[in-house]
Every structure is written in structure tokens, then in C-alpha cells.
Image (cartoon, grey):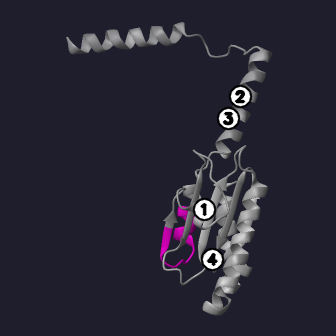
Amino acid sequence: MKKGFAAVCAVLCAMTFAACGNGNEEVPEEKAAYVEIEASETSAAEEQTVPCSAITEKLLSSVELSSMAEVGADRIGMYLDLTIPENCDFSMYICGSGGFADEIFVIRSTPELSTEDIRAAAEKRIETRKTDFEDYNPDEVEKLENAYIAERNGYFIYAITGDSAVCGSVFDEFVK
């Protein structure tokens, strides 16, 4: 009985596949163009949706950093002259002990917050930190002078670490 049931199922499956056609049907030109455009728009959108936290997590595991602490939106004003719009994607880490200049900040710009505003706030932060560390820990000033700063496709990053080249590679890996 089981063999007979399996045979009937196999015949039904074969008939179903045969009814679907031979697969050589042509797609009308208008439809083909639409599908192509839709696919390219999707891939461009996918490139722009990398979470900022993914970039900072990779940096945290790729570069030697000292006791990093995450900064939330409620405390960002303590470090940067910025107001982060609600639902804005960003990620920031600073040295928790305050003894080192290490910082990472990644953000996606929004209509309310341009990359120019973000860059100005980051540059001001870095200059302030240089003054802070001149007498306190002069070795950290070199990190600040060699900070990695970049913007691409709506993303902005600044990273103060001992290895700007690695920061650039990580940013390039995530933001095309």
C-alpha cells in the first residue's frame, strides 16, 4: 500500500511540473527592464543599510583600544556639539578611564543632520582633546593628530586609535 501511494504521489508531482511549462517563456521587454532596475535599486539600498554598531564592533575587535565605554544618545552632547535626531543610526565609544584619547564615532547623516555639521563637531572635539592631552598625556596627542576621518555614502566616521590604517580598511569593508 505504501509503495502504491508513493507511486501515485510521484505521478502527480511529474504532472504538476509538466503543467508549469518548459521554462523558456520570454519576459516582455518592459518587464525585464523593470526587474533589472528593481534589482539594482535593491542592491544600492542594501549597501546603505550597514548598522553603525557593526562598524564600531569590528573596529573594537580589530584595533588595540583602552577600556572602551559606549556613549548613548542621552550623553552624546557631553562629547560632541551635536543633537542626534531621534532614530538616527550612530555608535560611539570613548576610553572609559579618560586616560587615553581613544574614541570611535560612526553615524549616518539624516536630513536634519548633515555630514558637514557632523564633521565640524568631530574636528572641534579632536582639537579640544589635543589641548586636554598636551600636558596630561602627551603621547596621546599623536593619536589625535593622526585620527582617521572619512565620509562616504552618508556615513561619517572618526576614529582615534593607534592604527588609522586598520580603521580605514574596516570602514572600506563596510561602506562601499
At label 2, counting other C-alpha atoms closer than 10 Å, the crowd grade (few under 14, some 14-19, many 20 or more) is few
Q: Amino acid at mark 1?
A: Gly
Instruction: Write down the quadrant of residue 131 in the picture.
Output: bottom right
In front of the other: 7 or 41: 41
Assign a secondary structure to mark 2.
helix
Q: Position of residue 167 (x, y in %)?
A: 65, 69
Circle 4 is placed at which residue position? Answer: 161
Residues marked 1 and 4 touching at CB (< 8 Å): no
Q: Disc 2, disc 3: CB below 8 Å?
A: yes
**Relative to the observer, which residue lies in front, 38 or 96?**
96
Provide the residue designation for mark 1. 77
- Label 3 amino acid? Thr
Q: Residues under labels 1 and 3: Cα distance?
A: 35 Å
Report x, y in % for residue 150. Answer: 74, 63
Please tell me whether mark 2 or mark 1 is closer to you in this view.
1
Q: Which residue is mark 3?
A: 42
Q: Nearer the viewer, residue 122 or 33?
A: 122
Query: Residues in magenta?
Result: 56-69
User: Amino acid under label 4?
Assistant: Thr
In the rendered image, the vertical position of residue 146 relative to residue 134, given as above or below:
above
Quadrant of the rendered image containing residue 159: bottom right
- Circles 1 and 3 in contact, beta carbons < 8 Å: no
Mark-to-mark CA distance, 1 and 4: 21 Å
In what quadrant of the picture does the N terminus appear?
top left
- Crowding at dot 4, Cα within 10 Å, few <14 / some 14-19 / many 20+, comes out as many
- Label 4 residue SS: loop
CA gap between label 2 and label 1 equals: 40 Å
Residue under the point 57% across and 58% down:
91
The answer to whether 102 appears left or right of 96 in the picture is right
Question: Which residue is located at x 62 percent, y 64 percent?
Answer: 105
